[in-house]
Image (spheres, helix red, strand yellow):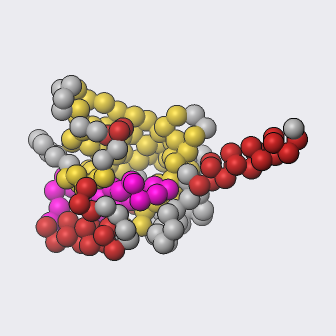
């Protein structure tokens, strides 16, 4: 009985850690500055997943809490239902505060990875993000529209890293 409990505990810890790790071959950005990163970002592109399905006009706003954690507020318009939806989460650094790698929770003690693997570190104008595996991919920008050159750079980088670029959704940002 004790052996089964130990195996279950180790397996559970492995699964919790695996969900906050970066995918193999993808490195979080270094020299990250949370003060520059905080604020509002527009979702330019993503790989589809159930919690954002059918959404457009998606934004993410990051606010630094007094304890150094980050409040995450994701907002999007569900076109089929003609209504806005939002989710509030909490992010904590996985490594040091100068590495763009967080664990984010939108429900209780369960965390998922938020790995910034490319960032305009000069001006913090765009970021490419993934989670614990290559099923998740986001392209965020400080502006609702970006150049075709930047879109092509995103596609090329994502393809090189093994993401399913043919499945990328370009997010509509109306009225902004």
92 sits left or right of 3 in the view: left
- Secondary structure mainly formed by the magenta segment: loop
Write the residue at 30% across / 70% down. 159
Above-or-below relation of 156 to 171:
below
Write the residue at 43% across / 35% down. 88
Q: Identify which residue, 48 or 63, lies in the foreground.
A: 48
Question: Could one spot residue 54 in this view of the protein?
Answer: yes
Region in magenta: 122-147
Quarter of the image where the C terminus is located: top left
Q: Identify which residue, 1 or 162, lies in the foreground.
A: 1
Above-or-below relation of 120 to 68:
below
- Where residue 148 appears, as percent x and y from the top left, is 13, 67
- Where residue 68 appears, as percent x and y from the top left, is 57, 50
Write the residue at 28% across / 39% down. 53
109 sits left or right of 124 in the view: right
Question: Could one spot residue 31 in this view of the protein?
Answer: no
Write the residue at 60% across / 64% down. 96
Above-or-below relation of 107 to 81:
below
């Amino acid at each position: 009985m004790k052996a089964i409990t130990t195996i279950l505990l180790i397996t559970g810890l492995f699964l919790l850690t695996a969900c906050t790790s970066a995918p193999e071959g993808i490195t979080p950005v270094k020299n990250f500055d949370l003060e520059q990163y905080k604020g509002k970002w527009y979702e330019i592109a993503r790989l589809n997943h159930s919690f954002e399905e059918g959404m457009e006009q998606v934004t993410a706003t990051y606010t630094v809490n007094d304890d150094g954690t980050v409040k995450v507020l994701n907002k999007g318009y569900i076109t089929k239902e003609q209504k806005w939806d939002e989710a509030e989460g909490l992010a904590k650094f996985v490594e040091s505060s100068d590495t763009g790698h967080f664990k984010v929770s939108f429900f209780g003690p369960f965390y998922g990875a938020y790995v910034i693997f490319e960032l305009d570190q000069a001006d913090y104008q765009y970021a490419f993000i993934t989670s614990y595996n290559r099923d998740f991919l986001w392209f965020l920008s400080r502006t609702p529209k970006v150049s075709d050159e930047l879109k092509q750079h995103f596609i090329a980088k994502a393809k090189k890293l093994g993401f399913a670029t043919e499945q990328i959704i370009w997010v509509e940002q109306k009225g902004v």
